[in-house]
Amino acid sequence: MKKDLLKRAAAVGLSIATFASMGFGASAASVSYDVPTSPMTVDDSLITCSAHAQADATPEILGITNTTDRAAEVPADYDLKKAQSSVLIGTFGTDINSAPNPYLYNWAYNSWAKENGKSLADKHTLGGISGNPNSVDTEVVPDLGTVSSLYYRPDMLIGTSGGDYSALIADLPENKDSNKDNDYDPYIVNYPMSVCSDFLKTAYELAKDANEITAGDSSRHTRYGDPLEIADQLTNYTVGIQSYVLEQLNKNGAQKKTVAVFDPAQSKDGVFYCVDSNVSTQGTTTHSRVGEFLDQTTVNVAAKIGKTASTVKISGKDKAYYPLSAEEIVANSDIIITGGVQVNGNKSEDSIREMLLQYIDPKDTELVSKVKTMPVMSSSFSTVGSIGANSIENLLGMAYWTAYCYPEYINPVDAATYWYYHFYHVTDNAKLATIIDSTMSTASKPDGVTTSIKDYSDSAFQKKIDEGMSYYKANKASINSSVLDTMAANLNHDAETPSEPEKTPASASDFKDVAQGSWYYNAVDNAVKNKLFAGTSATTFEPDTNMSRAMFASVLYRSQKSTVVTSIAPFTDVKSGDWFYNGVVWAYTSGIVSGMSETTFAPNADITREQMAILFYKTAQATGKDTSASGDLSKFSDAASVDGYAQQAVQWAVGAGLINGSDGQIMPLAPATRAQVAQLFLNYSKLS
């Protein structure tokens, strides 16, 4: 929304009884959605994925159509009551959404149709998957002939730990026949979830993969436009709001507020166990996540008074907490946050104050008065947006909790409204007003803040985000926040796109400089169809142009479907944000490539034919291919030119049929051309 239409939106009736909570990862109470009473035609050109548990929110926000989910969100069998109460389906599978997921929509419709004796829609979400957000779906469903995640052959599979999709994919009928053109070969995306920046990382990974699919086939699309723009908007929202608060503090010469974050369930006998930021040994996941939300804009009370962490056993596991007394919390804090699981139930703000007052000397009138009036945010972790501990909606948490602490700068309900409009894609103003009113009614709000959005201005809120981003970029060094830096680094994605491909054609025939009948035609066709590399323009491939070391590493990286890079390389000339970064780092950490020195990779240098042979040889070793072949180099007049360190690799490449030479020469030190690289990848693909 780029206009201020919301100023005219009133909290009018909606064909939904009530919204107790929105988002995923937590059950919503007293929610009743109007489910569809007619099916939706599934557009087969939609880019699809399979995700489950808290991973489901990320593709939906980006407009990538999810075809599956776990039982907690979507049961295996149709269930009208579940369809009417499911937060996931209500948000993305009904007409509330500006462009609903047709698979979710049809699951909800089928639940209604089954109850009313109507015909069922064929294509619908397959529910009932088990496992955490990053687990592999390995439970074969006999009626489907494979696992639910593979049934619709989605373009992407999200979740890579605790198993491996490769055997399941290889067992599909189209991957077992001789026609390799019809092989199913999806993108496989990891779902890290240790810190909030991980969720943005996954969003960008999915967005880039989706855009690569669209580049290869212009008919393929997502539901809300360019997903990379949505990922950028998520980054700007998260970094911009926090930076805007930092800017206002600087302008006003104000200090960061001090917060105490604790879980009432883990506090007893006058000792309140507090957390600071999200580290693996501290608190529960949800508890310490709240600490992470506030790391950038507040001071944690434990750090302020120099407390040392103590180990507390929670559910049989050692967790690090900071034990503080009620007096220490109240005397040294400006705000009390009771995040966390709250095992013994969500507590009201007054009940939290009463807990503290039990352990404060009533004669200390100053502390007694302070605890009665200081802000207390007692919402359970999931009350605001039903945020799941491992969902991308933690970015909403960062915004809402930050705004709660600084309502003088940002209205937290405005922060939620922006999220629901831009990321949940609830663009009908009247529906949005009702949703916010219902959702935020149970969430803690600062004094004077209401659930009404009648005065909300989207352009004014966007201006704050933009101002915050400008402040961050201009003062990045002084802000000195590794968290914000990690998040904002995603905005450099434009630099990761190779300069040569303007468009990925469908086949070699699209290139005017690749003639049918040329020795490299089939190789170029293979490279294009398998998205190894594209043309230098929409109509040119430049087969005789030399291949750089950076480009070769990137093509090798793509050929192995290795989309997850979590390590770093020691090269000073390979930086995060470089378009070739993932390829070089993957190849280096996999032991396939080394630098020209200990600290340099020389990404722009041409790759030689013997270097190329070495990299293929190491890749074959790393992936379990047979490397026993050994060709006779003596038949080449320039065999003596092969460097000693490359001898074994070149012999293997010749023996395996990867390299054949030309005019009796093997030309080991000559630069490899784009056509030659394409041919080697085709030859390599045929090796057992």
Image (tube, rainbow, N blue to C red):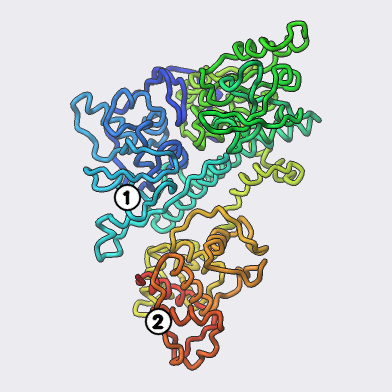
State the residue in front, 71 or 461: 71
Q: Which percent across, then down, holds residue 467?
A: 68, 38
Residue drawn at x 66%, y 30% is 310
Question: Taking 405 as reference, is 584 left or right?
Answer: left
Question: Quick check: 161 above or below 516?
Answer: above
Q: Which percent across, then down, holds residue 164?
A: 39, 51
Helix, strand or loop status at disc 2: helix
The image quarter containing residue 515 is bottom left
State the residue in front, 436 or 602: 602
As shown in the figure, which amino acid type bears the numbered disc 1? Arg
Q: Which residue was labeled with disc 1?
A: 153
Question: Quick check: 544 above or below 209?
Answer: below
Q: Which percent across, then down, holds residue 136?
A: 39, 46
Residue drawn at x 30%, y 64% is 180
As shown in the figure, which amino acid type bears the numbered disc 2? Gly
Crowding near the residue tagged with mark 1, few <14, some 14–19, many ≥20 C-alpha atoms within 10 Å: some
Residue drawn at x 51%, y 26% is 382
Helix, strand or loop status at disc 1: loop
Label disc, if present, on residue 655 of the rendered structure: 2
Question: Taking 99 as reference, is 288 left or right?
Answer: right
